[in-house]
Image (cartoon, helix red, strand yellow):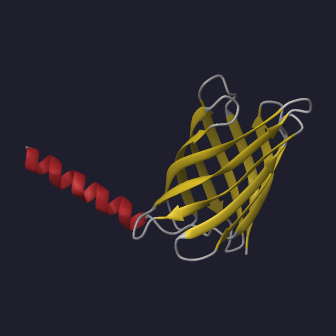
Amino acid sequence: MMKRIIALTGILAASVALTAHAEDRNYVSGGYNDFGDSDFYIKASRQIDSHWVIEGEAFDIGDFGTRLGGQYLLSNSPLFLKGGMSHYDFGNTDDTGGYVGIGTEIGLSTQATAMFDATYDSALDGYASVGAKVRYNFDQRFAADIGFRGNFDDIDNEFRVGITYKF
């Protein structure tokens, strides 16, 4: 029985690894962002070599919020590490912190990719979050994104839907 469980686990792990493919990380995207009193977001990402990606985003929360950081893509793996700085401006008050996290991506089909991550942000008195997003590629340049992020420590959850242009 134990050998069957190990064999099935190995087959499942191999099938996930074989369906994983590199998502294009050179893009700009934007759309609706429901995070507190927010309305919109815009995000850009650029892969600068086989391991490093820089990314930045601005979103409407309070007066505005920003994140600027990067990802480190692990060799021969769908996993990535991420980190950077975050800033939340609420007019009379603002808060800046750093964030770190880990994530993965899984190819669902030739047109769809799922992305999952867990992050800790030290801003806003510190909070952890887990997120899931699906990107559906209409063609090589345009895609639609939909995602949800569950935030802990009394921080509003996030919901996004948007369009991505890959370059």
The image quadrant of residue 44 is: bottom right
| Vertical position of residue 160 compared to residue 153: above or below | below
At 30% from the left and 62% from the top, the residue drawn is 14
Which x, y percent locates residue 100? 56, 47
The N terminus, quarter of image: top left
At 39% from the left and 70% from the top, the residue drawn is 76
Left or right: 62 in relation to 21:
right
Residue nearest the viewer, comparing 76 with 90: 90
| Vertical position of residue 123 compared to residue 72: above or below | above
Which x, y percent locates residue 164? 74, 62
The image quadrant of residue 15 is: bottom left
Left or right: 63 in relation to 71:
right
Which x, y percent locates residue 139? 68, 72
Residue nearest the viewer, comparing 10 with 64: 64
At 58% from the left and 60% from the top, the residue drawn is 71
Left or right: 119 in relation to 1:
right
Which x, y percent locates residue 27? 72, 67
At 62% from the left and 32% from the top, the residue drawn is 126
The C terminus, quarter of image: bottom right
Q: How many marks?
A: 0
The image quadrant of residue 65 is: top right
Residue at the limit of the structure toward the top, as seen here: 154
| Vertical position of residue 146 compared to residue 149: above or below | below
